[in-house]
Amino acid sequence: MGGHFLSIGECMVELSQAEDGHLRKGFAGDTFNTAWYARACLPDDWSVHYFTALGDDAMSDEMLDFMRAHDIGTSNIGRLRGKTPGLYMINLKDGERSFSYWRDNSAARQLAADGDRLRTAIEASNVVYFSGITLAILTHEDAETLLAELRRAKAVGKLVVFDPNLRPRLWSSFDAMHTMIGEGARASTLVMPSFDDEASHFGDDSIASTIRRYRQHGANMVVVKNGAEGATVGTDAGETLVPAAKVESVVDTTSAGDSFNGAFLAHYLEHDDPVAAARFAAKIAAKVIQEHGALVAPEKLQTTK
Ligand code: ADP
C-alpha cells in the first residue's frame, strides 16, 4: 500500500556531555524524533519527510545531511538567509538532567511563513504530524496559516495527528496555549497527549476527561500516554487501556512519548487497528527508554520491518 508521512516542526542541534567531559553533538526535537521512529517502523513503501525551515549556515547543511542519511526526506525544507537552527544542551548534575535552550531566533520559527511551500508539502502527504511545540514557536499569524492548511488536509480525509506536548514556557500566556492547543485538536483526526502534562496544565482529573476534552474539540481518536501505567485508546467504540511493557531498569526516558507516537502511527497505518498499534508502540517505547539519547538506532529496535 504505502504512502507519504510528513512531520512538521523544529529539529535542533543537541549538545550533551560525554563521559570524558567533551561535548557531543546530535540532532533532535519532538516532531523529528517521531519522524525518526516512524521511519524505523514503517515498511519501505512509505516515505517519511520532515518539514521545517533552516538557515544557510554549515550547521543547517549538516542537519539536512543527517536527515537524508537516515532516509528522511528534506525536499520541502526552506533555507533562510542569515538564520541558524535552534540549539539545546543537556546538563547532567548529580544524575539529574536539565536543559538549556537557544531557540528564540531559530529558522524553524518561520517554517509557516511560506504558505505555498507548506501547502505543497501537505498536499503531497497522506499523513501529517505536528505538535503543540510546532504551534508554540510560530507567530500567531503563521500558526493560523498552518492550522488552516491542516484543517484542509483533515477535510479531504488525510490523517492529521497532533501531540499537544504542553510547554507553558514557549507560550506567551496560559490563555494563548489553551486556545491554540484547542485549535490544534480541532484541525486533527488523532490527538496523542501525555496524561502528566494534561493533568498538570489543564487540570484533568482522569484519562477519561482528557479523552473527552479532545474529542469535544473535534478529534476522532485520542490516545493518552501515561508512562509506566500504559496508554489508553479512546475511539467511538469506547476506551481501551493498553499496559506498558515491563522495563527492569530505565536508562533515559527522553523520547518515550515521541517514539511511542512514531511506532503507533507506523503500525496503525499498516493495520488500521489502534489497540494493536498501542501494544506495538509500548514495546518500541520500552526499548527506547533502555538506551541513551533521543534517537535510538533502528537496529536496536528490532522492528519486524
Ligand atoms: P512522554 O514522554 O510524552 O511524557 P510517557 O512518559 O507517557 O510520555 O511515555 C510514553 C510511553 O512510553 C508510555 O505510554 C509507555 O508505553 C512508555 N513508557 C514510559 N515510561 C515507561 C516505564 N517506566 N516503563 C515502561 N514503559 C514506559
Image (tube, rainbow, N blue to C red):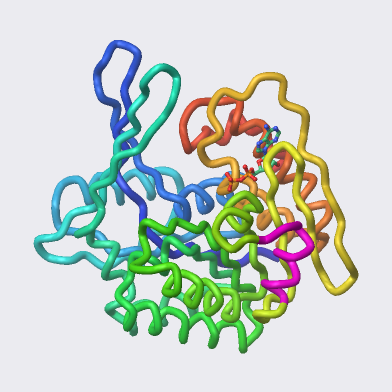
Task: Confirm whether the magenta stretch covers residue 212.
Answer: yes
Task: Confirm whether the magenta stretch covers residue 96.
Answer: no
- The correct choice, above or below, for 81 with respect to 224 in the image is below
Residue that lies at the very extreme toward the right in this rendered image: 237
Report x, y in % for residue 154.
61, 82
Magenta span: predominant SS is helix
Q: Residue at x 33, y 19 (%)?
A: 18
Residue 42 in view, yes or no: no
Going by the image, does 185 lie left or right of 223? left
Going by the image, does 135 lie left or right of 220? left
When asked about the image quadrant of residue 134, the answer is: bottom left
Residue 73 in view, yes or no: yes
- The correct choice, above or below, for 253 with respect to 216 in the image is above
Q: Nearer the viewer, residue 142 or 25?
A: 142
Q: Residue at x 37, y 65 (%)?
A: 171
When asked about the image quadrant of residue 302, the answer is: top right
Q: Residue at x 53, y 75 (%)?
A: 184
- Provide the residue span drawn in magenta: 204-215
Quarter of the render that holds ligand 1: top right
Q: How many marks?
A: 0
Report x, y in % for residue 225.
68, 50
Task: Pick the quarter of the image with the N terminus.
Answer: bottom right
Q: Nearer the viewer, residue 297 or 84?
A: 84
Q: Residue at x 15, y 58 (%)?
A: 56
Going by the image, does 95 lie left or right of 109? right
